[in-house]
Amino acid sequence: MNLELTLAVWSVLILFIHIGLQAGFLTRDLGSAYNAGPRDERRDLSVVGGRAERALRNFLETWPAFLVLALAASVVGTSNWLTQWGAGLYLVFRLAYIPLYLLGIPYLRSLVFTGACIGLLLMFVGIVF
């Protein structure tokens, strides 16, 4: 298995971290009965609970692109320094993004998000060119 696919597998851990944080804060803020139910009525979360929910959504916006690029690098056989560095940057920056978002740290959080996107761009360039 190439490095990009290995990192794609490890990225599932980031997904579990996001889901665990979001579910934990939702249960803390609104109770286990609400979390276990259909959640038909919209209730407000705490500030940090809302951040955990938005951070998860943000991850889910970029994660499919990462998975596609990692798979493409493997299937097409274009694993190279650009795709490998890009995959590593994406993973590290997405992991660093979690506490920055939960703590509400502006600018640095945006910079870290941009770093993850640069990782995706490196992967794209490494595959296409």
Image: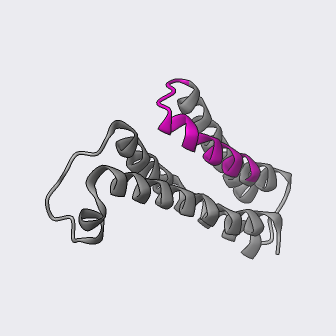
| 112 vs 59: above or below | above
- In the rendered image, the quadrant that contains the N terminus is bottom right
The magenta stretch spans residue 86: no
List the single residue furthest toward the right.
81
| 115 vs 95: above or below | above
* Residue closer to the observer: 14 or 91: 14
- Identity of the residue drawn at 39% across and 46% down: 54
- In the rendered image, the quadrant that contains the C terminus is bottom right
- Identity of the residue drawn at 40% across and 40% down: 48
* Residue closer to the observer: 70 or 90: 90
Where residue 97 sits in the image (x, y, percent)?
A: 58, 41
Q: Quadrant of residue 46?
A: top left
Magenta residue span: 88-107
Q: Main secondary structure of the magenta part?
A: helix
List the single residue furthest toward the left.
41
Where residue 41 sits in the image (x, y, percent)?
A: 14, 59
- Identity of the residue drawn at 60% across and 58% down: 14
The magenta stretch spans residue 96: yes
